[in-house]
Amino acid sequence: MKKYLCTIFLTSLMSFGAAQAQNVKNAIVGVGAFTCGDWTEARSGRGTPILASATETWAQGYLSGSNQQYSAEYVTLPSVSTINAYLENYCRQYPLKRIHEGLGALYAQLAKEGVR
């Protein structure tokens, strides 16, 4: 009986979590969900070292996906070093913002400037 009740409870809990996730629009998971402060700390060597390198790959995927989703004409995406420089400046100004917000701002700027 205990096993049966535990199974029902866990199933209900998982269903509730899935329903909650469906109600969240534009949910970001992975590296992009970390704060700029986390990323800055990782790049300085004081935080989680893998976060700094993982961000580079995640950022390229995020920007490439934005290109696919939002542009009739593709925006020319910057190099990894340019992305890092942009994020450094953005994160210095907004340490509580998320990495994906900085990348969204970068993409918006590139699209506005018509970098093709």
Image (cartoon, rainbow, N blue to C red):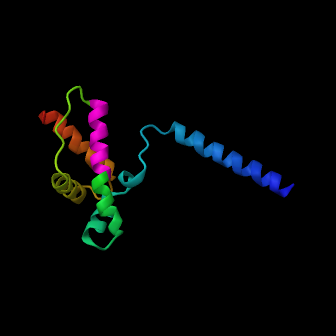
Picture quadrant of residue 64 = top left
Residue 68 higher or lower than 57, as above or below: above
Spot the residue most to the right.
1
Q: Who's the residue at 52% across and 37% down the image? A: 23
Q: How many marks?
A: 0
Question: Among all residues in the image, which is located at the extreme top?
Answer: 72
* Residue occupying the point 17% across, 50% down: 79
Q: Is 68 in front, or is 97?
A: 68
Q: Is 39 situated left or right of 1 in this image? A: left
Confirm whether the magenta stretch covers residue 61: yes
Q: Position of residue 25 (x, y in %)?
A: 45, 37
Quadrant containing the C terminus in the rendered view: top left
Magenta span = 58-70
Q: Can you say whether 64 is above or below 80 in the image?
A: above
Q: Which of 89 and 29 is in front in this view?
A: 29
Magenta stretch, overall SS: helix
Residue at 44% x, 43% y: name it: 27
Residue 92 percent location from the top left of the image? 22, 60
Name the spot of residue 9 as percent of width and height, x first: 74, 50
Q: Is residue 116 above or below residue 32?
A: above
In which quadrant of the rendered image does the N terminus lie? bottom right
Q: Quadrant of residue 20?
A: top right
Residue, far bottom? 46
Is residue 111 within the magenta segment? no
Decide: is 98 above or below 42: above
In this image, 63 relative to 12: left or right?
Answer: left
Between 50 and 19, the one nearer to me in the picture: 50
